Image (tube, rainbow, N blue to C red):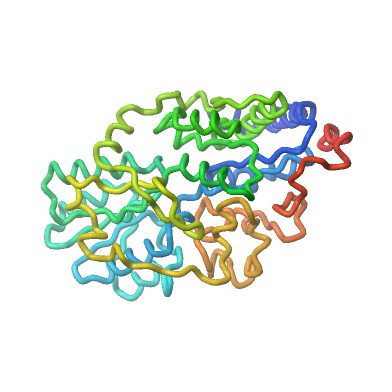
Amino acid sequence: MKYLDEYRDPRLARRLLDELCRTATRPWRIMEVCGGQTHTLVRQGIDELLPAGIRMVHGPGCPVCVTPLETLDRAMAVAARPGVILTSFGDMLRVPGSHTDLLALRARGADVRVVYSPMDAVRLAERHPEREVVFLAVGFETTAPANAMAVLHAARLGLANFSLLVSHVLVPPAMTALLDSPECEVQAFLAAGHVCAVMGWTEYEPIVAEYQVPVVVTGFEPMDLLEGILMAVRQLEEGRAEVENQYVRAVRRSGNDAARAAVARVFRVTDRAWRGVGELPRSGLELRPEFAGFDAARRYEVDTLRSAEHPECIAGGILTGARLPTDCTAYGTRCTPRHPLGAPMVSAEGTCAAFHAAGRTADAPSGTPSDDPSGSSSDAPSFQGSCSS
């Protein structure tokens, strides 16, 4: 298929891997900040084909996974109200809350519906003026423009029965929080191409300047990721720290001006809690005061609800790249895609789900966070030949 097959060419992949072997002379740790990229890396086995010492650290790039437990509990509290239609994307329905999930709540009679766009929820509100329609608005900057447009459209229509339960998060503050951690071992980032298609990459430039870490805007196909990793390794080997754009077919520096304007019109930056991580300053979006009438958390008085994570789930460590799914004592036994304990095992972009689907086990050959981070490996002289065919 045009514009797809060429990004999955095994011969080109081999050439990129060979070039990586020639380029890399030291161990490096690179974090991909996108769950879709994580799934490609794991499903295709790219992380296991890289030169020895180059380790991919799986970051907080799954929008479902970072949605805090209390948001799910708030959504279920709203959905249980008489006369409410709660709408959501399908992957949110099986994410466990404190006691149940939205799918089980629907089985018990709650009107919970899967939609493919927030505009579907607006149309539901138009068709059912006697019902309250709530859309669970989660995700990174990628989904924010569509949710902003839904609010603007509902406002133009005068729909008093439509609202959003907002849990939007932002990528740059999460990267900064990771880099500020004394345990951080990340030396470069692959930035999510779809986020940058909306926001551009100007927000990453101050991070690169302050922390001297390369950031490469990268796509989602195997060749995108291999080229992005190669670009990051070249910067690291040369002692450079810049923002580079691998995803040139979709991303420009300024992003999408119309999308950014819609987001700025409807939302403002706020502190936001991340699942398993806690509250990060200025890391999320909330509705502006002029659109407070569309805020479901206030409308249904659930904004003060707090919840505690499952004691066995190590989602926080997984989302920050400090742990691997195989480090979890419940992985693949008490926690599976059919019976998940936490969001990373549910979502199509979750790291635990990616590892489980690929059959990864605790004795898999991929690197673990316990590997020596110092870069002083005694086998460094043989490093370049470690992935030769």
Q: Closer to the camera, 303 or 117? A: 303
**Quadrant of the image containing the C terminus:** top right
378 lies left or right of 272: right
**Quadrant of the image containing the N terminus:** top right
Whether residue 1 is visible here, answered yes or no, is: no
Coordinates of residue 36 in the picture (x, y in percent): 53, 44
Whether residue 236 is visible here, answered yes or no, is: yes
Coordinates of residue 222 in the picture (x, y in percent): 62, 36
Coordinates of residue 203 in the picture (x, y in percent): 45, 32
The residue sitting at 30% across, 69% down in the picture is 77
Q: Closer to the camera, 312 or 362? A: 312
The residue sitting at 31% across, 41% down in the picture is 146
Give the total number of marks visible in the rendering.
0
Up the image or down, 2 lies above or below 94; here it is above
Coordinates of residue 358 in the picture (x, y in percent): 66, 54
Q: Closer to the camera, 35 or 321? A: 321
174 lies left or right of 358: left
Tell me which corner region of the image, top left, top right, bottom left or bottom right, holds residue 335. Answer: bottom right
Tell me which corner region of the image, top left, top right, bottom left or bottom right, holds residue 105. Answer: bottom left
The residue sitting at 73% across, 54% down in the picture is 370
Up the image or down, 23 lies above or below 357; here it is above
The residue sitting at 26% across, 53% down in the picture is 164
